[in-house]
Structure formats: C-alpha cells, structure tokens
Amino acid sequence: MVLVNIGFDFDGVIVDISNRNEIKSRWADTLYGVKIPAEKFSKSHVVGGGYLTIEQYAGLQNHVYNSREVGLDMSPVPGVLEFLPRLTAQGHVAKVITSREPAAAALAGEWLDAHGLDIDIVGIGQSASKAEAASKLGLSVFVDDEYHKLQNLIGVVAHRFLFTWPYNARVEAGYVAIRVSSWGELYYAVQALRGGR
Ligand SMILES: [Mg+2]
C-alpha cells in the first residue's frame, strides 16, 4: 500500500468558516452595540464606513480568531470527523499547517483534541508561505481553501486540492489545484492517488 503524507489547512478545511461574517456581526453587536449586517462585513466597509474604529475592529478580530469562547465553538466541516480518521487509520500521515499565529494555532489544537482528531498542528503565521513546512514534512498532498496558498506549493507538494466553498468558487484553479467539494470526495481522491479501492 502506498502511504502519503497529507497536509491540511485548518480554517475552511477542518472548521467551517462560511458563517464567520455572521459571527463577526453578532460579536460587533455584543461587544460594541453596533449592528452591521453579516453580508456587509468587510474591513473596508466596517472601518471605512465609520461603524467601528480601527482599534475596535482589531479587538473584534482578536475575539473572533483568538478567544476560546469563539474558537472552541466552531463547527466542523461536514465529513471531517468521519473521513480524516479513516485516512489516518489507513496509515497516511496527516498534519495541519495553518497560517494562524502561535496562540490561535494552539487554540485550533485544542479544538482538534476536543473533537477527537489526533493530528499535529503547525502555526506558521500570516506572512509565511506553507512551502517550507510542507517540504520539511515531506508532504505529497495538501488541501487548502485558499488558492494562493496552494500556488505557493507548486514544485513542493505534488497533489494540491482546493476545497470548494461559495467564497472561492469563482477562482479558476487551473493547473494549481484540483477542486474537491466535500470530505468524501477528498477521501476518494486520496484513495485514487495510491491506486487502491
Ligand atoms: Mg483556510
């Protein structure tokens, strides 16, 4: 059996971030008493439009990304709790490489533990490319929900998968990545790579 080292992004691959603007909208109201519709939640609208000061916006971002209250309450992407353990049970080595800063990555590690996912996580920070970590770990598969993160892995990771969401559906994946739209699809794509089942 051919086993592969597989890397996963965290936000948008393991935890569902498709409702993150709703969470920000809710917390903007709770923390600052400001009502901003989720569909309008962008920094340019919120700060540029004068709804929150830059300091308030930073505080909100910090709460949404770094607080235990929000971080441990995130929903799993459907299928991850079934298919990720199936991959590791087959002997594939799985690692999480996230662009989160160390504190937020540690919180993600707690989330993984709380959901029974026995997988190591590396937080490389916002400004670093995932290429170095992927190369060090000898990954031959990587799954991300951001096109440019996969673009950085060309020549480093042989099989690059873009996890499809409405927010990235318009990107032309081209030669950069193969799209998968569910964990089931990803699971069978990995099986196909090793020529099994
Ligand atoms: Mg992501």
Image (cartoon, rainbow, N blue to C red):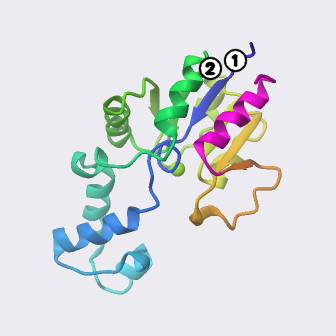
Task: Looking at the picture, tell me which residue is in the foreground, 59 or 162.
Answer: 162
Quarter location, residue 143: top right
In the rendered view, tell whether residue 25 sits above or below residue 84.
Answer: below
The amino acid type found where label 1 is placed reads Leu
Magenta residues (range):
181-197
Left or right for 106, reference 94: left
Query: Label 2: few (<14), some or many (≥20) within 10 Å?
Result: some
Check the image and report above or below for 70 versus 106.
below
Give whichever of 93, 107 is nearer the camera. 93
Q: Secondary structure at mark 1?
A: loop
- Residue at the spot of label 1: 3
SS class, disc 2: loop
Q: Are marks 1 and 2 in contact (CB under 8 Å)?
A: yes
Q: Position of residue 20 (x, y in %)?
A: 39, 62
Mark 1 and mark 2 lie on one chain; the one further toward the N terminus is 1
Whether residue 97 is in magenta: the answer is no
Q: Is residue 58 visible?
A: yes
- Of the residues shown, which amino acid type is indicated by label 2? His
Q: Which mark is residue 92?
A: 2
Quadrant the C terminus occupies: top right
- Expressed as whole percent of the image width and height from the top left, the position of residue 169 reads 66, 64
